[in-house]
Image: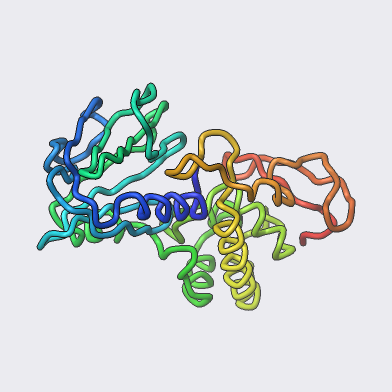
Amino acid sequence: MPELPEVENVRRTLLELVQGQRVKKVVIHRPDIVTGFATPQSLLQGKVIADVIRHGKQLAIIADDVTQTTINVHLGMTGRLMGINRPFPKHCHVQWTLYNADTLGFIDPRRFGGLWTFGALAELKTQRWSKIGPDALLITPGSLAQGLSKTKRTLKAALLDQNLLAGLGNIYVDELCFNCKIRPDRMACALTVDESRLLVREMRKLLKTAIKRGGSTLRDYVMVNGQSGKFQNMHKVYGRAAQPCTHCNTQLHGMLLAGRTTVFCPQCQH
């Protein structure tokens, strides 16, 4: 599933394609992928696209009109937004054609993602984004410490909770815990204030580095321009169970936490 760095790179490459462009035509192949009004007009046909913003793992494509008509995009497990040439690939559920002849498709083979339509950006923020936590790049140490102190779950489970903070998934939680030298199976409520500060500091550093590298391409993720990310080549623990730690050479351990495969170093992380 694309996490914050991947979605941010989708946002940036999408913005390059669509900002200031008017949508000429929208074709909806799978109306059930759309929540709300599944009409070409609600999907911005005839409108100029003003901006693309992100909160956690979600995007908002915003029209340049009075109410800021908005499409909320959640990529789910296998969703992609791609600037593509005809013929459109299989599982392309919605396609947009711009007046400059560029095209965009929402592709999602497993259909765990989707599109939500809103007559105003304010409606999206009230109805959906208000229900998830602060963006992982913006959360404060105090807010994270408060959230962790109230849960009886492991740190891994807490950091995966989009209601606590929005944007992290399995990849970046494992990498973050390693960078902080904290075991992912520690109880979240037992972390100190200093450890919460460390988590926020290292989280920002990790996410910014991953964004700069284009995110992690493991299976389905590519940017709108079709380019793959390169941060997967910098993973220190994710997907490396039984391999040597990059820091101390100890064999990395794998376990199941919060229903997710988790990898950590028993020597470096405490």
In the rendered image, the residue lying farthest to the front is 100
Q: Is residue 54 left or right of residue 226?
A: left
Vertical placement of residue 185 versus 75, above or below:
below
Seen at 88% across and 50% down, the residue is 250
Q: Is residue 211 left or right of residue 232?
A: left
Colouring mode (rainbow / by chain / secondary structure / one colour): rainbow
Which quarter of the image is occupied by the C terminus? Answer: bottom right
Seen at 52% across and 54% down, the residue is 5
Vertical placement of residue 194 versus 184, above or below:
below
> In x, y percent, where is residue 211?
55, 58
> In x, y percent, where is residue 181?
74, 63
Seen at 53% across and 72% down, the residue is 145
25 or 237, nearer to the observer? 25
Q: To which quarter of the image does residue 191 belong?
A: bottom right
Seen at 42% across and 27% down, the residue is 110
> In x, y percent, where is residue 95?
27, 33
> In x, y percent, where is residue 162?
44, 54
Vertical placement of residue 78 versus 186, above or below:
above
Q: To which quarter of the image does residue 78 belong?
A: top left
Count how many numbered circles sit on residues in the image. Answer: 0
Q: Is residue 169 left or right of residue 235?
A: left
185 or 246, nearer to the observer? 246
Q: To which quarter of the image does residue 32 belong?
A: top left
